[in-house]
Image (cartoon, grey):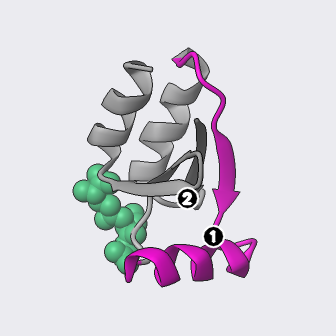
Amino acid sequence: MKYALYYYDACPFCQRVLRALPGVKVEVEKRNVLTNQEFRKQQYAATGRTTVPCLLISDNGKDTWMFESADIIRFLQSR
Ligand SMILES: N[C@@H](CCC(=O)N[C@@H](CS)C(=O)NCC(=O)O)C(=O)O
């Protein structure tokens, strides 16, 4: 299982998730959608949305995209 967080620094909801990351047991790759437009395009192509934070959960080729900071934090803390 792999995890990637789509975010940007000025987003307060992203900051909530970023602050929780040091306390979770899994590794989460950070993908800044403002400094790398490819990440923004990937997210939009897959979900039709540019809302952040968004967590990409990749499980053997199956991708799941999760929105909502509280849901993302709860999910990561349960891993
Ligand atoms: N309820 C959401 C709010 C997320 C949100 O409003 N994100 C803003 C940035 S702070 C955003 O991406 N807005 C642009 C959009 O939705 O395309 C959460 O807690 O994650």
Residue at 67% x, 48% y is: 30
Determine the residue located farthest toward the right in the rendered image: 36
The residue labelled by disc 2 is: 7
In the displayed structure, 63 sits above or below 76; it is below
Total residue callouts? 2
- Marks 1 and 2, how far apart at CA: 6 Å
Along the line of sight, which residue is nearer the eye, 41 or 20?
41
Quadrant position of the N terminus in the picture: top right
Q: Is mark 1 within 8 Å of ligand 1?
A: no
Quadrant position of the C terminus in the picture: top left
The crowd level at tag 2 (other Cα within 10 Å; few <14, some 14-19, many 20+) is many
Along the line of sight, which residue is nearer the eye, 63 or 17?
63
User: Which quarter is ligand 1 in?
Assistant: bottom left
Residue at 50% x, 55% y is: 62
**Upstream in the sequence, badge 1 or badge 2?**
2
Residue 76 placement: quadrant:
top left
Residue type at mark 2: give it: Tyr
Residue at 52% x, 73% y is: 43
Q: Which secondary structure lies at badge 1?
A: loop
Residue at 74% x, 71% y is: 35
Image coordinates for residue 3, horizontal then vertical, percent: 58, 42
* Pointer 1 with pointer 2, Cβ within 8 A: yes
The residue labelled by disc 1 is: 33
Q: Magenta segment, which residues?
A: 24-49
Residue 60 among magenta residues: no
Residue 6 placement: quadrant:
bottom right
Image coordinates for residue 19, horizontal then vertical, percent: 52, 31
Residue 44 among magenta residues: yes
In the displayed structure, 35 sits above or below 26; it is below
Residue type at mark 1: give it: Val
Image coordinates for residue 77, horizontal then vertical, percent: 41, 21
